Image (spheres, rainbow, N blue to C red):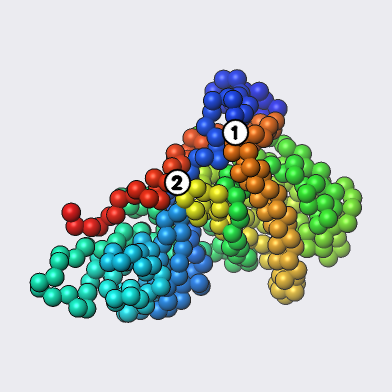
């Protein structure tokens, strides 16, 4: 366990400052580990008989929903002329390329080439198919080793199905390396950024724990003045009276996901729960797609939440917009300087950087984009 202010990591070694001269890998050059389930689309965006384009770390993916209702995920290129399959047409259980109507099954194999005759060249087997699952209103794919997909669990989000909570889903593109998003949520000392929305908040780190794959921090939040958005009060469970309260917020990075639980003063369970993940889109992983599930406890009078719902969404969108402004500015600084020159002093963030480094993979964007073997082709 590592407490706030410690100058040592968990095993007792002196902590190293993350500086370009330290010899440690630049975190912004570390890729997301593909051996996990990542959402790449909202379920409702992949309609029956339709195709949708998605991506993971530069790998373009075509999602299609077959007549049976099952969603399939294929490498987004036709093995024939490399035209994107996301431009294709769903035909029953298969996906046809829009160019020459080559038909692909959900496993990526070619089921039909309409004009193929006996004298023609031997065709390829097909394209890569990704393991795919639907959960929580999201379409998840497993971009890593397919043999690991069966033994790797989907993220656990128990509150999503609970009748005690109502869920708000977020899906936004953010132009930054995914690690900036992990740091932003864990480092609640940045509340000054949101002063126009939440007023004056005093966050106090109560303590945190670090492990090989996770970092969990607990904060005490106290509202000390200033104008506070009404939706912020509702989310903090202050009720219609708007009485001030202190809230305990627990934030956890459990690689590669993040969660947040907010428990108001005198409450014994969270009134707000967040699950989030930041999915890299481009090969250099300087752009990510943030997916979030915000689960809010239903009040004693359910209609009150229905009335407040659009205001709560507006509030959360404002907070997210301010966070996005900050992390995208961090990414621009990295792009301009060509390296990570920030000088972090908060031991909690130093620990989460270590977790992201050790669980990530080497980032070789050009090799990933240009020299990746074409799976499923006949030698």
Count the marks.
2
Quarter location, residue 72 = bottom left
Residue 265 sits above or below residue 171 on the image: above
Tag in front: 2 or 1: 2
Q: Is residue 228 left or right of residue 44?
A: right
Mark 2, residue position: 365
Q: Is residue 352 left or right of residue 81?
A: right
Residue 346 sits above or below residue 171 on the image: above
**Picture coordinates of residue 114, whole percent (x, y):** 22, 78
**Picture coordinates of residue 291, whole percent (x, y):** 57, 58
Residue 235 sits above or below residue 306 on the image: above
Q: Is residue 147 left or right of residue 112?
A: right
Query: Any mark on residue 292, and which?
Result: none
Mark 1, residue position: 351
Q: Residue furthest left?
A: 119
Which of 136/301 is in front? 136
Near mark 2 (Cα within 10 A), the count class, few <14, some 14-19 or many ≥20, is some
Residue lying at 38% horizontally and 67% vertically, measured from the top left:
84
Q: Is residue 136 left or right of residue 59?
A: right
> In the structure shown, which secondary structural element does the residue marked by tag 2 occupy?
helix
For the N terminus, which image quadrant? top right
Residue 183 seen from this side: no
Residue lying at 34% horizontally and 48% vertically, measured from the top left:
371
Residue lying at 41% horizontally and 51% vertically, measured from the top left:
369
Among the two numbered marks 2 and 1 on one chain, the one whose residue lies closer to the N terminus: 1
**Picture coordinates of residue 5, whole percent (x, y):** 70, 27
Residue lying at 54% horizontally and 25% vertically, measured from the top left:
23
């Amino acid at each position: 366990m590592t407490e706030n202010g410690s100058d040592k990591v968990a095993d007792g070694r002196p902590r190293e400052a993350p500086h370009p001269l330290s010899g440690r890998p630049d975190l912004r050059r570390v890729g997301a580990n593909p051996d996990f389930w990542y959402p790449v689309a909202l379920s409702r965006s992949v309609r029956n008989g339709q195709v949708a384009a998605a991506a993971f770390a530069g790998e373009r993916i075509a999602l299609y929903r077959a007549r049976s209702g099952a969603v399939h995920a294929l490498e987004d290129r036709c093995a024939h002329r490399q035209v994107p399959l996301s431009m294709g047409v769903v035909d029953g259980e298969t996906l046809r390329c829009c160019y020459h109507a080559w038909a692909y099954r959900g496993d990526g194999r070619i089921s039909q080439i309409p004009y193929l005759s006996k004298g023609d060249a031997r065709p390829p087997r097909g394209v890569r198919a990704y393991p795919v699952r639907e959960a929580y209103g999201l379409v998840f794919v497993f971009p890593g080793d397919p043999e690991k997909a069966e033994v790797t669990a989907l993220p656990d989000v128990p509150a999503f199905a609970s009748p005690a909570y109502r869920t708000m889903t977020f899906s936004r593109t953010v132009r930054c390396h995914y690690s900036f998003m992990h740091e932003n949520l864990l480092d609640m000392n940045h509340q000054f950024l949101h002063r126009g929305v939440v007023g004056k908040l005093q966050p106090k780190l109560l303590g945190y724990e670090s492990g090989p794959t996770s970092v969990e921090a607990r904060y005490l939040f106290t509202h000390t003045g200033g104008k506070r958005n009404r939706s912020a009060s509702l989310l903090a469970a202050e009720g219609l009276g708007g009485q001030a309260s202190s809230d305990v917020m627990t934030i956890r990075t459990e690689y590669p996901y993040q969660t947040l639980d907010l428990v108001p003063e005198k409450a014994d369970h969270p009134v707000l729960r967040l699950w989030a993940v930041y999915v890299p889109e481009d090969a250099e992983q300087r752009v990510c797609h943030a997916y979030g599930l915000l689960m809010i406890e239903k009040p004693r009078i359910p209609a009150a939440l229905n009335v407040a719902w659009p205001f709560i969404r507006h509030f959360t969108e404002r907070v997210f917009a301010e966070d996005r402004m900050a992390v995208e500015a961090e990414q621009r600084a990295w792009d301009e300087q060509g390296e990570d020159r920030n000088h972090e002093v908060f031991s909690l963030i130093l620990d989460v950087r270590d977790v992201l480094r050790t669980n990530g993979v080497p980032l070789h964007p050009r090799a990933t984009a240009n020299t990746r073997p074409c799976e499923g082709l006949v030698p």
